[in-house]
Amino acid sequence: MSAKTWTSPGCPVARAVDIVGDKWSLLIIRDAFDGIRRFSQFQRNLGVARNILSGRLQNLVEAGVLSVQPASDGSSYREYVLTEKGQDLFDLVISLRQWGQDHAYEPGEQHARLVDRSTDEPVPRLVYTAPDGSRVRAGDTRVRKAGE
């Protein structure tokens, strides 16, 4: 990101939202996980204006979430590929997907499902656990501010 004007300098959530928190950036990242790599593919899949897509892709490249590589087929096109930093957003995308499945559809309404590539079984629910194996819930945590 060219201008690092952090929403809240001491908050990791605010910093993450500054980088990937707008609708188009998250949908670009989702599509990148689904194997989309070229500008035209992102545009066709998202239906977003070229200038908006170009800006979001540029921001994600500058933030180190995507890298630009020569096309894998040897053509003159460029491809956008998730970096290791971008791959680390997988849990976020899974969490959003699972929240959407639970709360953004009416009962019985059809929607896409994430399945394991080798078994075709649904991906298990993402759950955070404590060292003892118990589930970590919001009420079990607190934020320790920098300098505490």
Image: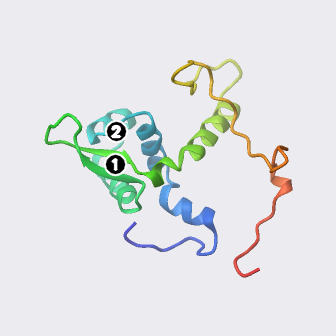
Task: Using the image, determine if residue 17 lies above or below residue 77.
Answer: below
C-alpha gap between disc 1 and disc 2: 8 Å
Residue type at the position of mark 2: Phe
Q: Quadrant of residue 77?
A: top left
Q: Residue furthest bottom?
A: 147
**x 64%, y 42%: residue:** 95
From the viewer's perspective, tell me whether residue 117 is left or right of residue 32. right
Q: Quadrant of residue 108?
A: top right
- The residue that label 2 is drawn on is 42
Residue 25 screen position, x and y as percent: 45, 50
From the viewer's perspective, tell me whether residue 23 is left or right of residue 11. left
**x 74%, y 46%: residue:** 128
Task: Using the image, determine if residue 42 lies above or below residue 16.
Answer: above
Residue 114 screen position, x and y as percent: 57, 27
Task: Using the image, determine if residue 112 lies above or below residue 35.
Answer: above
**x 36%, y 42%: residue:** 48
- The residue that label 1 is drawn on is 53
Q: Quadrant of residue 16?
A: bottom right
